[in-house]
Image (spheres, grey):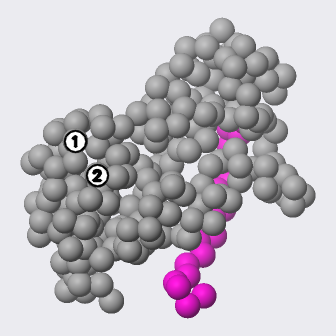
Amino acid sequence: MFNKILIANRGEIACRVAATADRLAIKTVAVYSDADAYAKHVAACGEAVHIGGSAPKDSYLRWERIIDAAKATGAQAIHPGYGFLSENEEFANACAAAGLVFIGPPASAIQAMGLKAESKQLMEKAGVPLVPGYHGKDQDAALLQREADRIGYPVLIKASAGGGGKGMRAVDKAEDFAAALASCKREAINSFGDDAVLIEKYVQRPRHIEIQVFGDTQG
């Protein structure tokens, strides 16, 4: 059990992690941007460290500042919440190198499944059925437009590094694709530090079946 953890996120998820830690008698450290100085998650934690500007790319995505904050406050582990750095392999490795526990999947699992495009490639190799789409490395806007045309509208543009519902745009017709792509890429770079996208056929009436798998360092 840890004595103190740093929560590398904001909003409701950070508040929930803080509340759970409090029930377990674990001290907590918040991090915050200029815009979040008076946010609820700051008040929910025992300590708080300022890590940069209002834009996520200047604060919540600056993992070196987060690690410095954890070391400066004596935190033993970092809980990434969801979104931001939660699926960042480089961050997980940096935590380990700094002697901090990353409360999440090992870096190898993040590498395999953290990016939607790479996880779809892995599933493709395993013969798992996929929604028709494009998940290649070539991000040329003209190519992506052609791929969307090939797939057939409506399509869904997804940030490869996305999570938490961010970085997605539904496109109903070809003439709307370019603007939606630009908007999606802006949100992706600001939220995740990576503007790569994939395109899928938009399934209008899906059935969402999800299986959660939990494990610890013991297996």
Q: Toward the viewer: 44 or 173?
A: 44
Where residue 218 sits: x, y (%)? 55, 90
Element under disc 2: helix
Q: Residue at x 19, y 65 (%)?
A: 72
Q: Quadrant of the N terminus?
A: bottom left
For badge 2, the amino acid type reads Arg
Task: Judge whether residue 71 is colored magenta.
Answer: no
Label 1 packing within 10 angstroms: few (<14), some (14-19), many (20+): some
Q: Which dot, 1 or 2, sits closer to the camera?
A: 2
C-beta proximity under 8 Å, tags 1 and 2: yes
* Quadrant housing residue 49: bottom left
Residue under circle 1?
A: 52
Relative to 130, is 158 above or below? above
Q: Residue at x 51, y 48 (%)?
A: 163
Tell me how far mark 1 sits from mark 2, CA to CA: 8 Å
Residue 41 in sight from this viewpoint: no
Residue 8, relative to residue 106: is it above or below?
Answer: above
Q: Is residue 38 left or right of residue 147?
A: left
Q: Dot 2 corresponds to which residue?
A: 65
Residue at (35, 46) in percent of width and height:
62
Question: Is 33 or 150 nearer to us in this picture?
Answer: 33
Task: Identify which residue is drawn at 36% across, 37% down.
Answer: 57
Q: Is residue 88 visible?
A: yes
Q: Amino acid at mark 1?
A: Gly
- Total marks placed: 2
Write the start and end of the magenta stretch as one range: 200-219
Q: Position of residue 155 (x, y in %)?
A: 70, 29
